């Protein structure tokens, strides 16, 4: 099972919105690197749900429930979406400041490629971030 991070602007789609549905297509990704990450996702993979813009914090965990397919919001047919379902909120949201201040997380794309909206999270970083968020690393 792989781990990911998905960024969302809470004014457009928030963690509260995500928790209110059985599953939701993750649409609107228009960056090739982020789209390649979506294509690599498999059913059962987990992802941090990150509120971008003003909040800049990880607030929950979702599970991939549908693999890459055509993005219905794309008229060109070039982009893909995956389907995700909320698993659980983080007991303690993890801020971007906390992530940047932890030298163990220096390799995260969230720090190195701040504009990337979908990115892989390695197992070690996943465990560290879960711990910071008040969860055991296996969640």
Image (cartoon, rainbow, N blue to C red):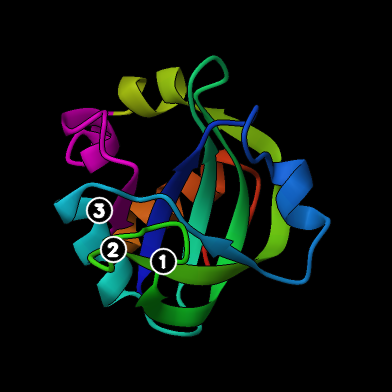
Q: Eyeballing the image, is 95 above or below 80?
A: above
118 falls in the magenta region: yes
Q: Position of residue 68 (x, y in %)?
A: 37, 77
Residue 34, numbered circle: 3
Residue range in magenta is 103-122
Whether residue 129 appears in magenta in the rendering, the answer is no
Counting from the top left corner in percent of width and height, residue 5 is at 41, 51
Which one is nearer the viewer's eye here, 106 or 45? 45
Q: What quarter of the picture does the N terminus occupy?
A: bottom left
Circle 1 residue: 71
Tell me how far mark 3 sits from mark 1, CA to CA: 13 Å
Judge left or right: residue 12 versus residue 33.
right
Please tell me whether mark 1 sits on a helix, a strand or a loop.
Answer: loop
Q: Quadrant of the C terminus?
A: bottom right
> Quick check: 55 above or below 25?
above
Please give the name of the residue rendered at 16% of the width and 54% of the height, measured from the top-left corner: 32
Q: Say what secondary structure mark 2 lies in.
A: loop
* Total marks placed: 3
**Residue at the limit of the structure toward the front, as seen here:** 75
Q: Which residue is mark 2?
A: 79
């Amino acid at each position: 099972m792989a781990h990911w991070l998905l960024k969302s602007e809470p004014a457009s789609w928030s963690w509260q919105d995500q928790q209110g549905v059985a599953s939701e297509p993750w649409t609107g990704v228009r960056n090739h690197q982020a789209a390649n990450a979506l294509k690599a996702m498999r059913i059962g993979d987990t992802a941090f749900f990150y509120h971008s813009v003003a909040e800049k914090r990880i607030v929950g965990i979702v599970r991939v429930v549908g693999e890459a397919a055509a993005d219905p919001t794309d008229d060109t047919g070039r982009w893909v979406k995956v389907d995700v379902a909320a698993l659980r909120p983080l007991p303690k949201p993890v801020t971007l400041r906390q992530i940047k201040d932890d030298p163990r997380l220096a390799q995260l794309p969230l720090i190195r490629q701040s504009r990337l909206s979908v990115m892989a999270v390695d197992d070690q970083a996943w465990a560290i971030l879960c711990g910071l968020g008040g969860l055991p690393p296996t969640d």
